[in-house]
Image: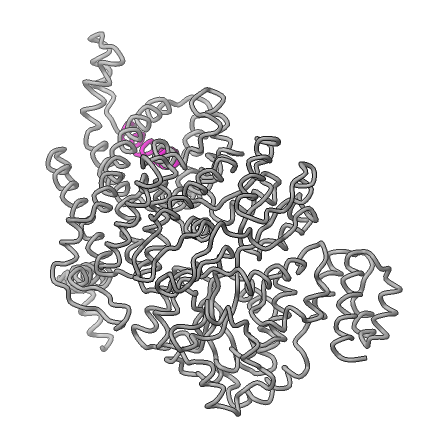
Amino acid sequence: MKEKDRKFYLASVTDRFVRGQMDRRSFLRTAGTLGLGATALGMGFGSRPFGVSRALAQEQLEPSAEVISWLKDVAKPFAGTTLKLATESTPPSNAINSQLKKYFEEATGIRVEIEVLPLEQVLQKLTLDVASSLGSYDLYYIDQSWSASFSQDVFDPREQLQEKPDLAMPNYNIDDFMPALVDGIAKYEDRWVGVPYDIPIFIMIYRKDIYEKLGLKAPATFEDLLNNSVTITKEMGPNLYGYAGQMKSGHYALECEWTSMLWGNGGSIFNADKKFVGNDERGIAALDYYTKLKETMPPGVDQWTWDGQGQAIAQGVAASMLSWGEFFPYFDDASQTKVSGLCEAVVPPQPVALRKPEECGYGEIPGTGHQGGSSLAVSRYSKSPDAAWIFMQWATCADTQALITTLGGGTGPTRASVYDDPRVKANARVGAGTTRHLSVVRETIDKYMGSEPDLPEWAQLSSDTIPVGLGKYFAGSYGSSKEAMDDIASQVETVLKG
Amino acid sequence: MSIAQVKRIAISDSPWPWLLPLIALLAVFTIYPFIYNVWLSFHEFVPKSRGLKFVGFANWVQLWNDGRFWGALGVTFLYFAVALTIEIILGMAIALLLDAELPGFAMLRAVLSMTLVIPPAIAGMMFLLMEDSQFGALSYLLGLVGLLDKATPMLATSSLALIGVLIAEIWQWTPFMVLIFMAGLRSLPAEPYEAAMIDGASSLQMFRRLTLPMMSRVIAVAVLLRGIDLFRVFDYVFVMTSGGPGTATYTVSLYAWQQTFSFLKWGYGATLSLTSLVIVMVMANIFIRVAKVRW
């Protein structure tokens, strides 16, 4: 049996066992055939059937022997080194920090300290590190909106691969990273600012049972989305609302959702002359659309970021949302939500019209699948750049990404091959940590991804100027959508002028 | 340094050996940061060059022309005035009620101080949940008595958001006023009250003519301490509204934090912080003179 097939079959039977679809005896027999016998016998199943079984079953998901062997070999000169990484709390970082780095540390003797911080604190730490050139952090977690700012402070991974062949991981295959993500997340001008590390992206998530009950079809267009949401709120409100938004005033979440509405209605943030055009005809139409959609949302949506939005779906308060795909596995977790197995994922609705990237400024790419994400890179100021490069290759290789996706609860991989990994595919069923939405994530990345512009002022515009202005509009501080967008436009111009 | 030298210093009449550690602490943690902040307000961090650039008075000019700053200052003053007024009135009323040796009052006084041990950010989070329009207990109760429409989210409505934040602030810090006022009430002499009762003065007259004048210094100290704290409000606003909706609850501290840490405008952030410090110092000194506070 091929190694790939063996892994797939093993993952499949383990999954069936933890879900109670296979008795213990059958599982042990099958596991023994697959060479897992001794380990399985040591699991001690019996009095604590479900939770423990699942945890132990996950224990079987370990780094491949080839990867561990390479780590042991290549990292010998760096044993005793300590590496530091400051990162936001994202599925890859959490999975590495809590479950996977022990394998790296055992194999290499390199200690890895991961500081999990709020995003703005990561930015502060990185900024201070580059300003002082101290090299306090060996690896940089770089949010996509910072790639322009830090492009000169990190090594281009393609250069590292070429310049240090002795440290290169066999079969690392840098071309496996999805080209759309390299462009959208990890590239600034001609440089790679690290490699794509994680990819939250907007997909359409809806309650299939509610849609079927009301005779509705999954929203294929923005018009469908609004009409369906209106129908659901009218038929089932106030117990259930058609749509949940992420509309907290002044928060980046509001800006993210607004850009989807803007792009989906044929608008863009900037035009080719780098002028803010959120207040043009399409921009106004987008805000009017967003206003109508808000009327189908639960009261209090103005206070929700993506957390509140996700909770609204999980608690059965709303029937649909266009939001981060990495939420989907949570909805399938019966121990966490009321809606396990009731949600479905589809690609974002088709836009009313779509502006072309060449019609926009600062590298903006309109698309209804709003993309977030970050890259991982080795700092130029690191005192141990070689050890950091080894860690970076391990953390972003296909094997580790497959483990991150399965252990980290179905987060979207940034490598194309990982979507086809048998361990990842084996989890494509209803239940905690499902990966059944990943085909939709992949299609959205390939065809519908929307990327925000890259400019140094974007942090301020996206986390303050635009969402504060939109917050004021939704709180009723402006007379019309036109007045609101004109005011935002003038503030954006002020920020850009410095 | 020999043991003999240490002994000589320890028994000398000079105050310096004892003052020097304190001076060193002040220099490191107060004087240097203050001077650095002043210096920083004439510079700005430039992300591209990774360094600070001298910008002269540009940050101060920007401050003068910054509508967001003036809006935040207005919100801060409003927050300060409303919270302080209510905390004084409520604090005094509760202190007068509890200033008696009745059964259970000792326990009530102890319970009152419990709000003070909760970190303000946690208190803000509690009220954020309680004021949620969907499942918040406080919103539900206000709805029952007709003060709030169920479809109106308090913290997401421009006209109500500041009130929502103030409720958390007042809930947490009124007991502080109660404790200070009760300490003051318990130190008042009994004789003037006995004389007033013989003269037939009413309770209200005794409060106006005796309690308030004799408590004036205690009240002044409480106002000064709370006033300084209120002007720096950050936690509740950050946790509950992040300054929104729009800019309805944006305070100067939140704005300074955002400019400094979110947008890395260290120079402008320092300018905002210094302005806030100057306003507090001027107000506190005027108050000390007017209220004749003696330390």
In the rendered structure, does residue B171 fall within the stretch colored magenta? Answer: yes
Residue A41 visible, this orientation: yes
Q: Quadrant for residue B217, please give it.
A: top left
Query: Quadrant of the rendered structure where residue A30 is?
Result: bottom right
Quadrant placement of the N terminus of chain A: bottom right
Task: Give residue B195's position: percent from left, percent from top.
Answer: 20, 14
Residue B119 shows in this picture: no
- B14 lies left or right of A91: left
Indicate the colouring scheme. one colour
For residue A424, side relative to residue A254 (left or right): right
B49 in the magenta segment: no
- Residue at image position (28%, 48%) is B253
Residue B12 x %, y %: 15, 64
Image location of residue B194, percent across then percent down:
24, 15
Question: As drawn, is A1 to the left or to the right of A338?
Answer: right
The residue that appears at 70% across and 69% down in the rendered structure is A423
Return the residue found at the far top: B200
Magenta-highlighted residues:
B166-185
- B66 up-or-down from A425: above or below: above
Give above or below for B61 relative to B102: below
Picture quadrant of residue A362 = bottom left
Q: Position of residue A404 (x, y in %)?
A: 61, 67
Write the residue at 64% across / 86% down: A69
**For the stretch drawn in magenta, what is the main secondary structure?**
helix
